[in-house]
Image (tube, coloured by chain):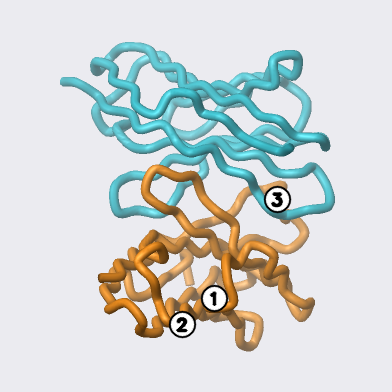
Amino acid sequence: GAGVSQSPSNKVTEKGKDVELRCDPISGHTALYWYRQSLGQGLEFLIYFQGNSAPDKSGLPSDRFSAERTGGSVSTLTIQRTQQEDSAVYLCASSLVLSGAGRGYTFGSGTRLTVV
Amino acid sequence: AQSVTQPDIHITVSEGASLELRCNYSYGATPYLFWYVQSPGQGLQLLLKYFSGDTLVQGIKGFEAEFKRSQSSFNLRKPSVHWSDAAEYFCAVGAASGTYKYIFGTGTRLKVLA
């Protein structure tokens, strides 16, 4: 697609429920990133996928968080047993593999998650 | 430790006035530096980036930034602010090689008075 697409744009869920957030990167971008933006905070790195390599999961805050990327394209971030502190905007970004940090990411519009 | 500091949480300027948003970084490797802008309800849009060479870089929407290695700063400037520039601005740093992760500042929210 022309840009990075994320769905849903907003999600309200009850504490303890599981949620799935979807990211569809720019066609041809093999690198995909998830970041979390909490109120008053900067962006927090969560996970990085690059091609068929093992993902870098070092930013996932707990084992309730997981992500997968199917077919080198669409990615799903899953949060199990959601807690109120999970409320944030979850941003997905993609980039060309060779540029990595160099050229800058293209971000999606994010999913605003509210846990009540 | 690697970090990015944006000391101003909020800035208010009048339309037509000049703007400078501050960014200081601490990074062990040769840095790539970026400024992003986030309008309400939107994702982050890249304004400009610095890799090497000329320390004054031009970006979109009339923004520029100057890299000062001695001060570990990468301040964003615009000579004349427009009402549409009201948004949140993020400074970020990444490695010139190796890691692909960015470190983001906490952002500066810009308000523009008519």
**Is A80 or B45 nearer to us in this picture?**
A80
Dot 2 and dot 1 residues touching (CB under 8 Å): yes
Query: Chain B: what color?
Result: cyan
Disc 3 + disc 1, Cβ < 8 Å: no
Is label 2 or label 3 in front?
A: 2
Question: Within the image, what quadrant is residue B61 found in?
Answer: top left
**Discs 2, 3 touching: Cβ within 8 Å:** no
Find the distance from the CA under tag 2 to the CA under tag 1.
7 Å
Rendered-image quadrant of the C terminus of chain A: bottom left
Location of residue B17 in the rendering, given as x and y in whole percent from the top left corner: 31, 12
Question: Closer to the camera: disc 3 or disc 1?
Answer: 1
Q: Are marks 2 and 3 on the same chain?
A: yes
Considering the numbered disc 1 on the image, is that residue within a helix, a strand or a loop? strand
Separation of marks 2 and 3 at Cα, in angstroms: 30 Å
The reply to the same-chain question for discs 3 and 1 is yes
Q: Which residue is mark 2?
A: A80
The residue indicated by pointer 3 is A101
- Disc 2 or 1, which lies upstream in sequence? 1
The amino acid at mark 1 is Phe
User: Within the image, what quadrant is residue B114 found in?
Assistant: top left
